[in-house]
Amino acid sequence: MARFFELLQDEAVVRERYSGEFDAAHKWGLPGANCHTCGAIWGVAGHQYPAVDLSQLPERKEFEEARPEPFSEFARLRELVRPLAPPNSWLPPGTTFGPLVGRAFGKFGPFTSQGNITWLVLREALERLQAEGVRGLVGCRTELRFRTKTPPDVLELQIEPWGRLHPDCIPPDVPPPCPTCGRHGFRLPDEPILDTASLPTELDLFRVGNFSTVIVGTERFMETVRRLELDGITFRELPTR
């Protein structure tokens, strides 16, 4: 039976061995949405596509400022970027695109996280994982500014949303998704359960589609990371149903 694990930064190891930090944001993003149906003004964290380049889009400046927009305007902007995004992407309010832009400093280990949502990987570590057959890893360039003359070769992992939390772990009193904007407002359960039937079979790393701040690796991913001694990550097993 397949096993799946949530990725979390290993804070103890990072504090002991590394000092790498970054203060950065993606170059472009969809605005938040003000929905006329449910009344929510909202945006998500975790829907990140650093490999998607909007630089040739004539309207690219409309994606440079974070702000809420009426849902109709949000939907118009979403359709402008949809042809550039991976097929079947949901692209909710707050989805970001393009490289990370900002400052970075300190010594980076194989994996460095920002809030367990954005993950950087050293190029060497990524190439070793790919050589071992770990599937679906996409490393993207960054525009991080280092003060050192020989900055580390760090890439951002593009981790796409796939799969879902099982309905059994979502409280029964949570309202259904809004029919207009799709917002399904609930807190992450203390004991998340993955919906087995929804999980990808060809990827070893992905986000949970209906809770995209949760990043999941397969047993193959976990075992390879540990065998190669690529530190910076701890793993929490998630049950499936």
Image (cartoon, rainbow, N blue to C red):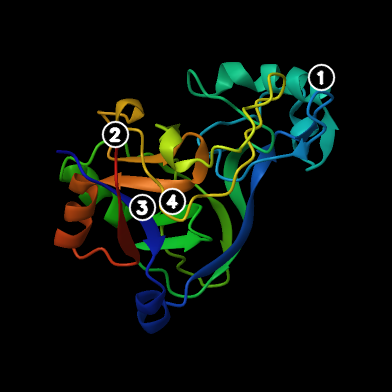
| Residue positioned most to the bottom | 16
Disc with the residue nearer the chain's start (3 vs 4)? 3
The answer to whether mark 2 and mark 1 are in CB contact below 8 A is: no
Q: Residue at x 51, y 41 (%)?
A: 212
Which image quadrant for residue 72? top right
Q: Which amino acid does the dot numbered 1 rest on?
A: Ser
Within-10-Å neighbours for mark 1: few <14, some 14–19, many 20+: some
What's the residue at 66%, 24% (across, down)? 56
User: Marks 4/1: CA distance?
Assistant: 35 Å
Q: Which circle's residue, 2 or 4, is located before the other in the chain?
A: 4
Q: Is residue 146 left or right of residue 121?
A: right
Q: Which amino acid is tagged 3?
A: Glu
Choose top left, top right, bottom left or bottom right for residue 47: top right
Q: Answer yes or no: do the residues labelled 2 and 4 have beta carbons within 8 Å?
A: no
Q: Residue 72's mark?
A: 1
Q: What kind of element bears circle 2? A: loop
Residue closer to the observer: 106 or 182: 182
Q: Which residue is mark 3?
A: 6
Q: Amino acid at mark 4?
A: Leu
Using the numbered discs, state the Cα–Cα distance from disc 2 to disc 4 in whole angstroms.
19 Å
Q: Is residue 52 above or below residue 83?
A: below
Nearer the camera: disc 4 or disc 1: 1
Q: Position of residue 36 (x, y in %)?
A: 84, 24
80 in relation to 176, above or below: above
Q: CA distance from mark 3 to mark 4?
A: 21 Å
Q: Determine which of the numbered discs, if any, sits on residue 203 in the image.
A: 2
